[in-house]
Image: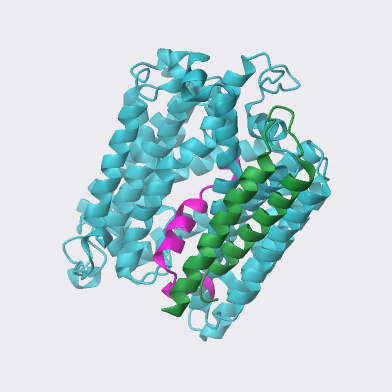
């Protein structure tokens, strides 16, 4: 494997997408938390995953 | 706790990624060095994160959250005083000898520096300890998932063991290290939101602090005397016992963590590994300890949340983390949180298995059983050892589930064995007159001193088995700190005396092993990549944190 950022980025991008989709479709709520936890965390993970993938891509080009 | 399909989806996605990483790394494994030491080729950001992740098992995460609820922010001493200074020391002062000696393991360094018997003693005790830690971690996983999700003990133990076996068997140390990095991000991204949500619920940091006794949100203010803080420790025991002996003994000599730095691609990268790792290590308390503190505040809020109770009636702090997850995470994030827990159990196990592998193959098998075989033979032995290591861990997990007392006893004995270690390394690396006989005698005497201290003192009903009780400690934690202090001092004195009475090693054999006979390579790198400036930045940040949460 050339760059560990690729699998890590892909993993979190995928999980982020799954969480966003869950948050938008179902809005599950936890007993003590009324916010849409899945959506917030999903968006953060999607961003994290995308940054990792972008960093890996930038390196492989240079 | 009930899981929805989306939770299982996330968990299985993680398994797929872990196994694929093992599969992809496999292509790079051609020699025993690739398998057991990563061929010294891993980039520094990866070794740094693996350096702390190898220690950040699930028991650690669950235990730190529990201690947060029990002792408050004082628990952060285990990170700020009990880890960071030692990490700086190993990076700045010790890594030139570990990495420069070309030793493949910590016991092998002892063989080069001292002699065969010192290595054999260290390798043997280390091998036994790693197998047991790995088994205990597996046992904890089985127990937790049985309790929280009603999965059967056997199926969670076997499932996690099988996955660990497959990816370590395929890719060896590199595979374990890569997965530790994935696990590190999982823990951070899986538990940081929990810390944020729970603290916000209690009204932010100030709201939380207002609902708790003062001592829960201060690290030093109540550390002056043991009766003022819930840990029951006083400042000397804390700083000398935890901050010096125990923490330096672990972070500077335990092969499990040192192995990560030794896998780095260059001397400069090896030295930077623990220094860079110190930055995330410093902020970990906010992710793993703060939820526990907030849980206690939450239980005073009449929201229906309370710290779970044991069957016997007392608070069961170990369940704090999982009950918080159940209260604050809906299906989806709940799956990710559980995946993070599962991941940290598995990488704790994999860390132990890979360290066991290297020590068994190089230090015990190659050192004592078959000395001059072709490399392919040792690669084969390494692979077989992976299978044996996992099998032994499973055996230990079952042993632990049937004989809890044996495990407590073994952990006590391991503590006695580990306590004096740092004195041996300190003298070995910085005093060229220290000899093999001295080191060996010092280690045995230190372990003996630890046992005697435990036998002559009492804390919470523990110890005192030698008949006479000379001192009673306010807590077992204080007792542990003082056992370590006595063990370390005894080892230091005995090693000094015996060394002076025995013949020194000739200086030509000590190059690259001892301070004064080792050329520290001048590194042509920008200042922010040099160990000393990095260490100073870490120290400044550490002081700031301690003052802030004084």
Out of A45 and B414, give the one closest to the viewer. A45
Q: Which residues are magenta?
A: B35-61
Q: B487 above or below B315?
A: below
Q: Position of residue B45 (x, y in %)?
A: 42, 62
Marker count (numbered):
0
**Residue A1 within the magenta-colored segment of the rendering:** no
Is B404 located above or below residue B353 in the figure? above
- On screen, B243 above or below B306? below
Q: Is residue B43 magenta?
A: yes
Q: Residue furthest front?
A: A24
Query: Is the C terminus of chain B in the top left, top right, bottom left or bottom right quadrant?
Result: top left
Main SS of the magenta part reads helix
> Which is nearer the eye, A20 or B312?
A20
Picture quadrant where residue B247 is located: top left
* Rendered colour, chain B: cyan
Q: Is residue B124 visible?
A: yes
Q: Colour of chain A?
A: green
Instruction: Kindly identify the residue that appears in the image at 42 percent across and 13 percent down.
Output: B227
Q: Residue at x 38, y 37 (%)?
A: B80
């Amino acid at each position: 494997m050339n760059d560990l950022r690729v699998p890590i980025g892909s993993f979190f991008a995928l999980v982020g997408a799954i969480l966003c989709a869950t948050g938008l479709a179902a809005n599950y709520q936890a007993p003590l938390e009324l916010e849409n936890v899945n959506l917030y965390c999903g968006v953060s993970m999607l961003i994290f995953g995308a940054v990792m993938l972008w960093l890996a891509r930038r390196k492989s080009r240079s | 706790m009930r899981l929805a399909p989306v939770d299982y989806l996330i968990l299985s996605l993680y398994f797929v990624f872990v196994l694929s990483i093992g599969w992809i790394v496999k292509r790079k494994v051609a020699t025993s060095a690739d398998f057991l030491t990563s061929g010294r080729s891993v980039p520094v950001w990866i070794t740094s994160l693996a350096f702390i992740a190898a220690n950040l098992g699930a028991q650690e995460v669950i235990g730190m959250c529990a201690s947060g609820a029990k002792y408050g922010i004082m628990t952060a001493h285990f990170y700020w005083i009990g880890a960071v200074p030692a990490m700086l020391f190993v990076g700045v002062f010790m890594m030139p000898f570990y990495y420069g000696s070309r030793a493949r393991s910590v016991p092998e360094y002892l063989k080069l520096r001292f002699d065969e018997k010192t290595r054999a003693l260290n390798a043997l005790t280390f091998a036994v300890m790693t197998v047991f830690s790995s088994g205990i971690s597996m046992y904890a996983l089985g127990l937790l998932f049985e309790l929280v999700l009603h999965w059967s003990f056997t199926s969670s133990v076997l499932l996690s063991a099988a996955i660990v076996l497959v990816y370590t068997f395929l890719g060896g140390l590199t595979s374990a290290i890569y997965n530790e990095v994935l696990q590190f991000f999982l823990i951070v991204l899986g538990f940081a939101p929990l810390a944020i949500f729970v603290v916000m619920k209690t009204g932010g940091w100030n709201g939380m602090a207002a609902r708790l006794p003062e001592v829960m949100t201060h690290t030093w203010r109540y550390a002056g005397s043991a009766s003022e803080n819930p840990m029951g420790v006083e400042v000397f025991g804390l700083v000398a016992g935890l901050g010096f002996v125990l923490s330096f003994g672990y972070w500077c000599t335990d092969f499990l963590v040192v192995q990560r730095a030794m896998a780095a691609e260059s001397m400069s990268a090896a030295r930077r590994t623990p220094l860079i790792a110190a930055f995330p290590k410093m902020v970990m308390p906010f992710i793993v300890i703060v939820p526990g503190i907030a849980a206690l505040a939450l239980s005073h809020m009449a929201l229906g949340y309370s710290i779970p109770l044991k069957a016997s009636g007392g608070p069961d702090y170990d369940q704090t983390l999982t009950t918080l997850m159940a209260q604050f995470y809906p299906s989806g994030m709940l799956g990710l949180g559980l995946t993070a827990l599962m991941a940290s159990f598995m990488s704790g196990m994999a860390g132990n298995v890979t360290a066991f592998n290297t020590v068994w193959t190089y230090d015990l098998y190659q050192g004592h059983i078959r000395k001059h075989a072709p490399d392919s033979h040792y690669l084969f032995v390494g692979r077989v050892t992976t299978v044996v290591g996992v099998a032994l861990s499973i055996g230990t997990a079952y042993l632990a589930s049937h004989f809890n007392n044996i495990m407590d006893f073994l952990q006590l004995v391991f503590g006695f064995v580990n306590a004096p270690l740092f004195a041996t390394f300190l003298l070995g690396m910085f005093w060229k007159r220290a000899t093999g006989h001295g080191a060996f005698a010092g280690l045995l005497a230190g372990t003996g001193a630890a046992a005697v201290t435990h036998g002559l003192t009492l804390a919470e009903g523990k110890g005192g088995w030698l008949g006479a009780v000379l001192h009673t400690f306010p807590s077992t934690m204080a007792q542990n700190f003082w056992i370590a202090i006595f063990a370390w001092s005894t080892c230091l004195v005995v090693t000094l005396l015996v060394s002076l009475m025995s013949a020194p090693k000739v200086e030509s054999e000590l190059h690259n092993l001892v301070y004064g006979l080792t050329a520290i390579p001048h590194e042509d790198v920008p200042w922010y990549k040099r160990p000393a400036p990095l260490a100073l930045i870490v120290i400044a940040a550490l002081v700031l944190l301690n003052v802030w949460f004084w």
